[in-house]
């Protein structure tokens, strides 16, 4: 199979634990793009938190793409055109705030280039480190959120948040997409917005078949794209149930797992042509 697109999650997939890209991985992805293969960065991060990765991999030079906010936005990184966008209504964001109070968990969203919270907490600080966005503590979440937002996150330690996830998936079934991106992040997006669904839209615009796509990820918000792609790949550091749904399991993010996939399924194939 000749693959035309490689889709990559960022945290714990493309990025090492120190938030860097290995030279081996960078070299493999640049070679793939030079050969005409599109690279899509697909993350739960806000767009601003993905820019440096796009620049390091020269996405603009090769007409590659960013898929941010778990699929709520798709940006053509060459033109910077936003070709797809979905958002939560203000009313929905306020509803999620009320639910977070009821369940005694934290909540954050994004506005004006900042992370919006009512009170500082360790999980918002993690999101700030990952995205590079500042945390803005506001007196009232609802007063601060007066426009639609792309997504919201509820925050708590993993064991408690797993309980909340199960409860809210049932309660909000048919109205919102609910998924965990990390043990302590429970993410809410517009119904039907997932990485897999957004990639379906993107390849439709590009005339690429899903059989010509590789998708690589490590977590539960990557499940839809791993299942959707012609070759779905789980990282070696992924949970066992994510590995079980993948077509291939590569090495961990600390062992150049992404480079292994690109070299094995893209560059070696190109060398044979």
Image (cartoon, rainbow, N blue to C red):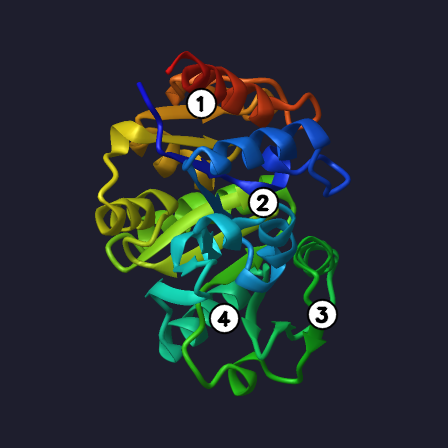
- According to the picture, the residue beneath numbered tag 2 turns out to be 160
- According to the picture, the residue beneath numbered tag 4 turns out to be 97
Q: How far apart are marks 4 and 1 (CA)?
A: 44 Å
Quarter of the image for the C terminus: give it: top left
Q: What element carries label 3?
A: loop
Q: Name the residue: 43% across, 64% down.
A: 79
Going from the N terminus, do you reach mark 1 or mark 2 first? 2
Q: Which of 180 and 159 is in front in this view?
A: 180
Tell me, yes or no, whether the two marked residues, 3 and 4, touch with CB atoms within 8 Å. Answer: no
On screen, 47 above or below 217? below
Q: Position of residue 3 (x, y in %)?
A: 35, 27
- According to the picture, the residue beneath numbered tag 3 turns out to be 134
Going from the N terminus, do you reach mark 1 or mark 3 first? 3
The disc placed on residue 266 is 1
Q: What element carries label 2?
A: helix
Q: Which of marks 3 and 4 is in front?
A: 3
Quarter of the image for the N terminus: give it: top left
């Amino acid at each position: 199979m000749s693959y035309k697109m490689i889709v990559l999650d960022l945290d714990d997939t493309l990025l090492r634990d120190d938030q860097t890209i290995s030279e081996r991985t960078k070299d493999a992805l640049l070679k793939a793009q030079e050969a005409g293969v599109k690279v899509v960065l697909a993350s739960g991060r806000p767009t601003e938190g993905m820019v440096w990765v796009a620049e390091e991999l020269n996405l603009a030079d090769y007409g590659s793409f960013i898929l941010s906010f778990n699929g709520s936005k798709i940006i053509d990184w060459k033109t910077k055109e936003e070709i797809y966008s979905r958002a939560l209504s203000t009313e929905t964001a306020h509803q999620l705030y009320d639910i977070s109070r009821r369940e005694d968990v934290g909540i954050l969203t994004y506005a004006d280039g900042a992370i919006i919270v009512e009170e500082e907490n360790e999980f918002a600080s993690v999101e700030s480190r990952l995205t590079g966005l500042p945390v803005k503590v506001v007196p009232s979440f609802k007063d601060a959120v007066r426009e639609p937002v792309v997504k919201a996150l509820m925050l708590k330690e993993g064991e408690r948040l797993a309980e909340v996830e199960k409860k809210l998936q049932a309660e909000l079934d048919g109205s919102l997409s609910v998924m965990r991106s990390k043990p302590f992040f429970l993410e809410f997006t517009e119904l039907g917005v997932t990485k897999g669904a957004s990639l379906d839209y993107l390849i439709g615009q590009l005339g690429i078949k899903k059989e010509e796509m590789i998708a690589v990820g490590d977590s539960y918000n990557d499940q839809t794209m791993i299942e959707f792609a012609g070759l779905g790949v789980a990282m070696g550091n992924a949970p066992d149930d994510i590995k079980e749904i993948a077509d291939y399991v590569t090495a961990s993010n600390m062992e150049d797992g992404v480079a292994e996939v690109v070299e094995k399924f893209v560059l070696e194939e190109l060398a044979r042509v």
